Amino acid sequence: MAKYEAIINWFNGYLWGPPLLILLFGTHLFMTVRTGFIQKKIGTAIKLSVTKDAESEGDISQFAALTTALASTIGTGNIVGVGTAIALGGPGAVLWMWLTGVFGIATKYSESFIAVKYRVKTEKGEMLGGAMYALQRGLNLKWLGILFAAFALLASFGIGSGVQANATAKLLKNTMHIPTWVTGVALVILLALVLLGGLHRIASVCEKLVPFMSVVYVVGCVILLVMNRHFLIPAVETIVTSAFTAKAAGGGFIASGVMAAMRFGVARGLFSNESGMGSAPFLAAAARTKNPVRQALVSSTGTFWDTVVICLMTGLVLVSSILAHTDIGSAASGDGSLLTTLAFSKLGVVGPIVLAFGMITFASSTMLGWSYYGDRCAEYLFGNKAVIPYRIIYTLFALVGATASLNAVWSTADALNALMAIPNIIAVLALSGVIAKETKYYLKDLDKIDPTPVPFRSEVDKKFTKRKDA
């Protein structure tokens, strides 16, 4: 395991170097301009998220698609992920996470748009979509679509199952002294009960769970911020200053440079909101919607709620807590999970309960959302017969993740996130002209119905097989 950790950390050093950081953040900025600053439509997008397009083609409602996508993004990255970013990159990482969220709204919009535009229908009438179909149908790059699907399938075991189980197991062990294997077994049972019902059961659970768990967690954060109110402004100043200077922040923080703040901030921001990764578009493609722009707007609100709101609140709680109690930073010693636990312990008996509730519900919902993403990739690569075996392996992997090394699990997830992001970003940038043109067209009247018929998958595969033979 030690050798594996050394190799994967070396690999991540290259993957998450300046080129990828520039590519991701640059895409966020480029698509912000290309879409006419789509972030200004966030109010309209939130309104659309609770509006039904009942007569449109799709498997689930727009709200169900959003909450299930939020279930996969609002996870341990919002809690332990923020703690890890601060522990390894310093308080400045919080600003880079937040900026990744603000500008990432445009990328989330764009990748969701092409997922809906290039989606296909199965013989059973189910909708399939994602970066692989956009690459295949929009750019005639099926080989790159296969690579994306393979990376996303592997990533589901890391970011979707392993990381969530690991973070939950470690936190419950630290706060309630529950053995990690017990948490792993419990998660396996919970997953199995839901996953047997497929997308509709997953969406049904997420529609009820996501709003409730988010409100409970945010209330806990607000209480902590009120308690740390005298350190709130200094926390903001520390976050902003540390994001652009190599000077040690002091007050219990471990010294980190600008590149460390940027690397861990952007990496954890991507891990949290998944903008640019191409994951949430799987669900966007399944939604009932009149045209691609409507669902793309709804999907973009996921990044807003996840990073612009929840991650920022967690970051402010952690940084203000460290300033208020300098022993927290030194005691955590680079451990993001412990840092988060110590900060919430300042709420007294309620703190560990709120944190444990947030971790369990956030992690469980993320595992449900990512199971669907893996489903779609398994079906794209191997056909419908691969879905059940995939669900079984995915469910059992929660036990592996719960008992594995924290650093190994997180580092592996980071590597797979980067690998699946690259082909997805290629699809977004290459199709940016289509995105810009149709965004402008449909924004004039969001009730316009897309006249393009959705083809059957068998017809699409046959078409590309003929091209290859020719």
Image: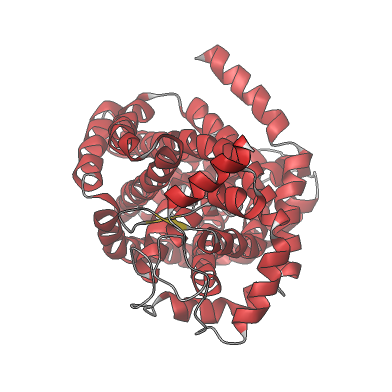
Task: Look at the image and tell me whether residue 321 can be seen.
Answer: no
Question: Does 376 appear above or below 390?
Answer: below
Of 342 and 182, nearer the camera is: 182
Check the image and name the residue furthest to the front: 470
Q: Where is residue 15, by image quadrant?
A: top right
Q: Is residue 243 above or below residue 377?
A: below
Q: Quadrant of the C terminus?
A: top right
Question: Eyeballing the image, is 50 above or below 155?
Answer: below
Looking at the picture, how far across and down is residue 287, in whole percent? 40, 65
Q: Quadrant of residue 200?
A: bottom left
Decide: is 43 above or below 134: below
Q: Nearer the viewer, residue 147 or 462?
A: 462
Q: Please provide percent x and percent y for residue 386.
A: 34, 34
In the image: residue 26, left or right of residue 336: right
Question: At x 37% / y 43%, what residue is drawn?
Answer: 375
Is 462 left, or right, of 392 in this rendering?
Answer: right
Colour scheme used in the picture? secondary structure
State which quadrant residue 107 falls in.
bottom right
Q: How many marks?
A: 0
Q: Residue at x 35, y 69 (%)?
A: 61
Q: Is residue 106 visible?
A: yes
Where residue 343 sits: x, y (%)? 46, 49
How far across and down, in percent of the image, does residue 223 sit? Answer: 41, 65
